[in-house]
Amino acid sequence: MWAYLYIAQNHLTLTMTFPFWGTHGVSEVVLGPVIYWFYWYFICSIPVSQIIRKALDIGSMS
């Protein structure tokens, strides 16, 4: 929630450089209603979650 509010207030000045996509504003649309920062957060959280599960030997999600 904090990221959404911070980006909504400062969206004109925030940019990120994405692999294969180049530099874009974080509040620009990737596809449909999905904006760049949320897509990047989602893509990065999946492998981190899996690494933590592996390290703690928690098991799979199924």
Image (tube, grey):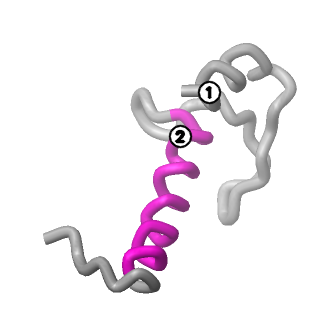
Q: Residue at x 80, y 38 (%)?
A: 15
Callout 1 touching callout 2 (CB < 8 Å): no
Which residue occupies the foreground of this view, 29 or 11? 11
Residue type for callout 1: Trp
The front one of 11 and 22 is: 11
Distance (Cα) linking label 1 and label 2: 12 Å
Mark before the other along the chain sequence, 1 or 2: 1
Q: Using residue 16 as the reference point, say whether residue 48 is left or right of it.
A: left
Residue type indicated by callout 2: Phe
Tell me if residue 40 comes above or below residue 46 in the rendering: above
Circle 1 residue? 2
x and y, in percent, of residue 13 in the image: 86, 26
Rendered residue at 69%/35% (across/down): 26
Mark 1 crowd level (few <14, some 14–19, many ≥20, 10 Å Cα): few
User: Which residues fall within the magenta stretch?
Assistant: 35-53
Q: Name the residue at the right extreme.
A: 13
> Residue at horizontal 63%, vertical 31%?
3
Tell me where residue 14 sits by quadrant: top right
Q: Is residue 49 magenta?
A: yes
Is 1 in the magenta?
A: no
Residue 46's disc number: none
Residue occupying image coordinates x 55% and y 49%: 41
Left or right: residue 2 compared with residue 18? left
Nearer to us of marks 1 and 2 is 1
User: In terms of image quadrants, where is residue 31?
Assistant: top left
Instruction: Residue 61: give x, y in percent of width and height.
Output: 21, 69
* Percent coordinates x, y for residue 21 in the rendering: 67, 56
